[in-house]
């Protein structure tokens, strides 16, 4: 696969639309991701952040619109050709998704074997390298059940980079972790950018993590990209939707949902 020219974004999504049954999730998403940058994707639960990531690796097909990776059109690619894209895009899934019946070493080896790496010396060298990268080389013989939540995330992250991808998609990498464990993941995201020049797309609800790792920010709202810009631009943004999201304030319409008949007693002593 040839690389695109350097001024082309590495990933480009244009007019992307996706519906599940009667639910129109993506209503025309336009966004580009430049090589070497970490972009944070923010937005309320259910707004389609994970759905967007899945389109980038061809796990979902759009109803309309285009997805481009490194000069190649992904949304129309045959399943057989998607392997080439998936090899270059590591995916840290929202739930870590380690195989519980496989050791840590076999979890890490899995993508290599799937992609036809059969030389056992190469497999061992690669899994040792990525386990060392996340600081868990001593856990290779353990089973996932023996690891803490933070360690499982780190192993899932190691597995996402074992094929030496250009891009890593991080879907809520710090959710469910305490602040210290979260910060270790943040540092790993920064390290992968610095040392492996990984282009990152980080979906998160964790604003502290977002501001630590993000070079650029997008905020999705009701099926489109509502904001795109730097941290300073995000903080200064006057759009009430963006402002409420950053402050963690529900809108009057959202609050109306819990204001049933008995709701007036909610605040009563
Ligand atoms: N395969 C699917 N089939 C049907 N509906 C789906 C499917 N995938 C996602 N959805 C729906 O699309 C909407 C967006 O889902 P998505 O997982 O992208 O949300 P999200 O922004 O990642 O939310 P969260 O922050 O909670 O992870 C949700 O209403 C979800 O139920
Ligand atoms: Mg999600």
Image: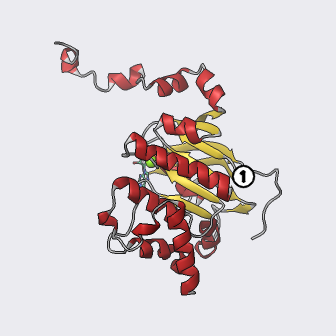
Q: Residues within 10 Å of mark 1 (few under 14, many from 20)?
A: some
Looking at the rendered structure, the secondary structure element under dot 1 is loop
- Asked if residue 110 is positioned above or below residue 154 in the image, the reply reads below
Residue 215, image x, y percentages: 65, 40
Looking at mark 1, is its residue's CB closer than 8 Å to ligand 1?
A: no
Q: Is residue 118 visible?
A: no
Using residue 189 as the reference point, say whether residue 206 is left or right of it: left
Furthest residue toward front: 138
Q: Which residue is mark 1?
A: 35
Residue 68, image x, y percentages: 69, 57
Residue beneath the point at 58% across and 21% down: 239
Residue 46, image x, y percentages: 43, 42
Residue beneath the point at 52% across and 80% down: 113
Furthest residue toward bottom: 119
Residue beneath the point at 70% across and 62% down: 73
Q: How is the image coloured?
A: secondary structure
Furthest residue toward top: 269
Q: How many marks?
A: 1
Q: Which corner quadrant holds the C terminus? A: top left
- Asked if residue 68 is positioned above or below residue 127 in the image, the reply reads above
Q: Is residue 184 visible?
A: yes
Q: Which corner quadrant holds the N terminus? A: bottom right
Residue 59, image x, y percentages: 52, 62
Q: Nearer the viewer, residue 226 or 119?
A: 119
């Amino acid at each position: 696969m040839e690389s695109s020219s350097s001024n082309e974004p590495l990933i480009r999504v244009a007019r992307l639309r996706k519906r599940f049954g009667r639910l129109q999730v993506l209503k025309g998403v336009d966004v580009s991701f430049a090589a070497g940058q970490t972009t944070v994707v923010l937005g309320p639960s259910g707004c389609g952040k994970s759905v967007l990531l899945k389109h980038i690796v061809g796990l979902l097909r759009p109803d309309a619109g285009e997805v481009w990776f490194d000069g190649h059109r992904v949304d129309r690619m045959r399943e057989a050709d998607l392997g080439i894209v998936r090899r270059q895009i590591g995916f840290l899934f929202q739930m870590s998704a380690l195989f519980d019946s496989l050791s840590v070493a076999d979890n890490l080896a899995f993508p290599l074997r799937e992609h036809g790496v059969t030389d056992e010396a190469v497999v061992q060298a690669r899994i040792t390298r990525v386990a060392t990268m996340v600081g868990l080389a001593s856990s290779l013989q353990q089973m996932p059940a023996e690891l803490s939540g933070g360690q499982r995330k780190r192993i899932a992250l190691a597995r996402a980079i074992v094929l030496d991808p250009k891009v890593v998609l991080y879907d809520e990498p710090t959710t469910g972790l305490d602040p210290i464990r979260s910060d270790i993941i943040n540092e790993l995201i920064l390290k992968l950018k610095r040392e492996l020049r990984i282009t990152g797309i980080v979906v998160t609800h964790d604003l502290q993590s977002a501001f630590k790792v993000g070079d650029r920010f997008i905020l999705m709202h009701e099926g489109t990209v509502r904001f795109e810009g730097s941290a300073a631009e995000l903080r200064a943004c006057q759009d009430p939707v963006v402002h409420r999201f950053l402050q963690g304030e529900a809108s009057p319409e959202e609050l109306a949902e819990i204001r049933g008949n008995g709701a007036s007693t909610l605040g009563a002593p």
